[in-house]
Amino acid sequence: MDVNLYNTLTRQKEKFEPVKTGEVSMYTCGPTVYNYAHIGNLRTYIFEDVLKRVLLRSGYTINHVENVTDVGHLVGDGSSGEDKIEKSSREQKKTAVEIVDFFTKAYLRDSERLNIIPPNILAKASLHISEQVEMIRTLEEKGFTYKTNDGIYFDTSKLPDYGKLAGLNIEGLKEGARIEANQQRKNPTDFALWKFSPKEPPKRQMEWESPWGIGFPGWHIECSAMSIKYLGDLFDIHCGGVDFIPLHHTNEIAQNEATFGHKTVNYWLHGEFLMIDGGKMSKSLNNIFTLADLKKKDISPTAFRYFCLNAHYRQPLNFTWQAIGQAKDSLDNLINHTAETILESQAGQKVEKKNDDEPAVYLAKFDESIYNDLNMPQALAVMWEVMKSPSINPARKLTLATDFDTVFGLDLIRLARMRTKIDSETKKIACERIEARKNKDWEKADKLRLEIEKSGHIVIDRHDSQFVFKNSDSKRAPHRK
Ligand code: AMP
Ligand code: ZN
C-alpha cells in the first residue's frame, strides 16, 4: 500500500517515493541540550517515531540522523542574544560540557522511556565544526554571505524563492524592518552563519578558529551541514515541530539550495504543538511539564505516548491533567483487555460465532489509517474494535494487536503479560474459587471473587473458565469497562 504524507513544502498529501528504492533517508531536528526536554518537545519526537515505525512497517529500511544542538542556538531562536547552552552553564554554575553531557543523557533516557527507536546516527553540532565552516566557505564563494561586526550573515535577498516553505511575505517583512533596531543586517530575514565571540567578558566556553575569526556557528548551519554529510545532497524526509517552519527550516533550505543549486529534501513534515491553556507549551513561557512532573502524578511515559496517539500530529493537542488522566485510564483498559486476551488464548478459548473475514477487514482499515498521513486516532479506534470484537478468536486478536503495536510503540503485549503474572496467594484463592464454582457454591465463589478483587485483581468468568489478572500497575486503578 502507498504511504501518503503531508508535505509542508507543497501543502498537500503526497505519495511517498524515496530517492533510493526500499530505503528512507530521514533527518529530524533533535534537542537543544540546555535543559530537560518538556512534553511539548516529546510530542514532536513521538510523532517522528511513529512516522519511522509506519515506514518500517511498510517495508522500508531507514537511515535516520538526528542532531543534538550543543552550540549556536540563541535565546529567542534568532541571530542575537545569549547562547542557550552558555546561559544554562552560567545559571547552573556548571561547565558547558557538563550541561551538554547531563541533558543529552536525560534526553536519551526520556526517549527510551517513551519507546522511541534511537536514530542510526546522533550527531552533535560541536563535533561537526569543520563541516559547517566548509559549507559557509562555499556560500561565501558563491556570493551569498556578508560580514557585519558580529558575524558572517546569509543574504536572503540573493535567493528569489527564499521563504517558500513557510510562504513568508518577504515584502511585508521588509516593511516591518524599517522600524527594526538591528541595523546590521541588510534584510530582516538574513541570519547568522558564523558569530564572532564577544570581545567583552564573560568569555565563551564553546568557540573555534575559523577563516573569519574566533567564534561559533549559527544554529541553522549545523542541521544543513550534518544532514548533508550523512544523508547526501538529496534525501527523503526532514522533520521538526511547526515552529521550525518559518525560521530554522526556511533557513536550512536557503543554505542548502544556495550551496548545491537544487532541492536537497523531498518531504518536509511538521508536528503541531502541544498546547496548554490555549497557548504553546514552551520553556520561555514557563508553562512546561516534563516526564518527571507526569511521574509525580502517576502518569507513565507510555500513558503520555498513548495521549499523543489520540490526536493527529497535524492538530494542536491541548494538555490538561484531566485529559491525560483519561488517556491513562483508557490505556489501562486496553492493557487489561490484552491481558484477558492473552489468558483466553493460553487456555485455547475460541469464540462461538467466528467471522473469518473480520481480521482481514480490520487489518485493511488499520493500514488505510496509518498510510493516510499517519492517522493514529483512527488506527487506535481499529485496535479497540479488534479487542472488543466478540467474533475474533483470542489468538488471532493477539496477532493483530502485536502487529498494530509495532506502530503504536506502546509495548502493549509485555505490559499485558506482566499483569497476567499473579502472586501465589492470589493463585491459591483463584483455584479455590474454581472449585467453589464447580461445586455450584455461588456464595463462596462471590466471596472469593471479592477477596481477589480487593487485592487489585480482575476476575473474569468465561464459560467454564476463570481468568484472573492484575488490574493496573498504578495506585489509582480504573474500573474495567
Ligand atoms: P528545541 O529543543 O527547542 O530545539 O525543540 C525540539 C523540538 O521540539 C523541535 O522540533 C520543536 O519544534 C519542538 N517543540 C517545541 N515546543 C513544542 C510544543 N509545545 N509542542 C510540540 N513540539 C514542540
Ligand atoms: Zn535542525
Image (tube, grey):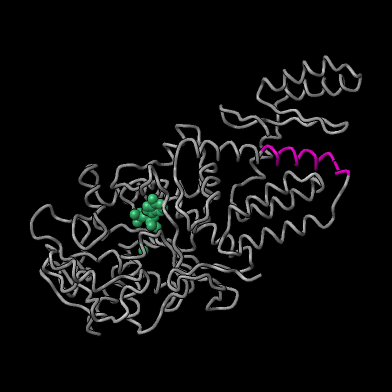
Query: Where's residue 455, x and y in %?
Result: 66, 21
Q: Quadrant of the C terminus?
A: top right
Q: Quadrant of residue 172?
A: bottom left
Q: Is residue 437 above or below residue 393?
A: above
Instruction: Work out whether residue 30 can be spotted.
Output: no
Q: Is residue 167 above or below residue 407?
A: below
Most common secondary structure along the magenta stretch: helix
Query: Where's residue 291, x and y in %?
Result: 44, 41
Query: Where's residue 99, x and y in %?
Result: 30, 48
**Number of disc labels:** 0
Residue 122 is left or right of residue 310, and the answer is: left
Query: Where's residue 205, x and y in %?
Result: 20, 55
Q: Is residue 21 above or below residue 53?
A: below
Question: Within the magenta stretch, is there residue 237?
Answer: no
Q: Quadrant of the N terminus?
A: bottom right
Residue lying at the far right of the rendered structure: 439
Q: Toward the viewer: 474 or 354? A: 354
Residue 252 is left or right of residue 177, and the answer is: right
Residue 129 is left or right of residue 473, and the answer is: left
Q: Is residue 288 above or below residue 258?
A: above
Q: Toward the viewer: 145 or 327? A: 327
Residue, x 69% and y 59% (percent of image)? 365
Residue, x 35% and y 84% (percent of image)? 261
Residue 236 is left or right of residue 197, and the answer is: right
Q: Quadrant for ligand 1?
A: bottom left
Question: Within the magenta stretch, is there residue 340?
Answer: yes
Residue, x 40% and y 70% (percent of image)? 227
Q: Which residues are magenta?
A: 336-352
Q: Toward the viewer: 231 or 288? A: 288
Q: Toward the viewer: 412 or 112? A: 412
Residue, x 58% and y 60% (percent of image)? 53
Q: Quadrant of residue 459?
A: top right
